[in-house]
Image (spheres, rainbow, N blue to C red):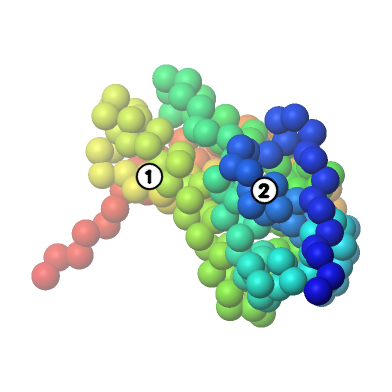
Amino acid sequence: MKSEEPVPEPEPGTVRPGGRTARVRAAVLQAAGDVLAEQGFAHLDLGDVARRAQVGRTTVYRRWGTVTALVADLLQDMAEQSLPRTETGSLLGDLRANARLVQRTLTDARQGPLFKAVIAAATWDARTAEALHCFYDTRVAEWAPCVQQAADRGEVPEDTDPHEVVRAVSAPLYYRLLTGDTPPDRAAADRAAEAAEAAARAGVYVRRHRHT
């Protein structure tokens, strides 16, 4: 039986420790992200990913099995590797930090096209849609505590929904990415944060309780 091709040694600091298994996963996910950014979901092929990653095809097929499973793992890894929440001491400062992080991600030469490809695929592929939802749920949950902290400080009503505030920050930036002639810039990020903060202060995102 033909032995599998070796995985090249990564540059220092480019992958997490964990031995060969971690290096294989990092190489494959990097290759998958490259294909998505360069060619889109339709051209994502496990054999091509294995070739790019210099990993044996059987390893890729055995571990991931399908393109959608690979995309799901890529999104999970991206969520885990995203920068942690910034704490500035004010809601506006925190939301602005969040908005600028989203803006930098969406305008990145690799990440922007990658997200476009995954979002497009999620419109027709259920597993990709589920993975995308999990990615955003993870990122929203990371930043939601800044809204709760603002409520504790009295900046916003105490029953403000933290998740809705955080979603309101990134929504216009993704809209610009997908529909605008130009990608969102830093000014757009700051406006998104300011609008979400003002709305939260005004009670727009207070949870509405049903009365029985």
Precedes in sequence: disc 2 or disc 1: 2
For this rendering, which residue is in front, 158 or 31?
A: 31
Residue 210 on image: x %, y %: 20, 65
Residue 162, numbered circle: 1
Residue 142 appears anywhere in the view: yes
- How many badges with numbers are in the image? 2
- Amino acid type at circle 2 is Arg
Mark 2–mark 1 Cα distance, whole angstroms, equals 40 Å
Residue 198 on image: x %, y %: 46, 36
Above or below residue 24? Residue 11 is above
Residue 179, numbered circle: none
Task: Give the residue furthest to the front.
Answer: 1
Mark 1 burial class by Cα count in 10 Å: few <14, some 14-19, many 20+? many
- What residue is at 55 percent from the left and 45 percent from the top? 80
Q: Is residue 162 left or right of residue 100?
A: left
Please give the residue where the numbered disc 2 appears in the rendered image. 20
Q: Quadrant of the N terminus?
A: bottom right
- What residue is at 59 percent from the left and 42 percent from the top? 18
Image quadrant of residue 51? bottom right
Image quadrant of residue 131? bottom right
- Mark 2 residue element: helix
Residue 204 on image: x %, y %: 38, 48
| Closer mark to the observer between disc 2 and disc 1 | 2
Residue 191 on image: x %, y %: 62, 36
Pointer 2 and pointer 1: residues touching (CB < 8 Å)?
A: no
- What residue is at 53 percent from the left and 63 percent from the top? 133
Residue 114 appears anywhere in the view: no
For this rendering, which residue is in front, 66 or 109?
A: 66
Q: Quadrant of the C terminus?
A: bottom left
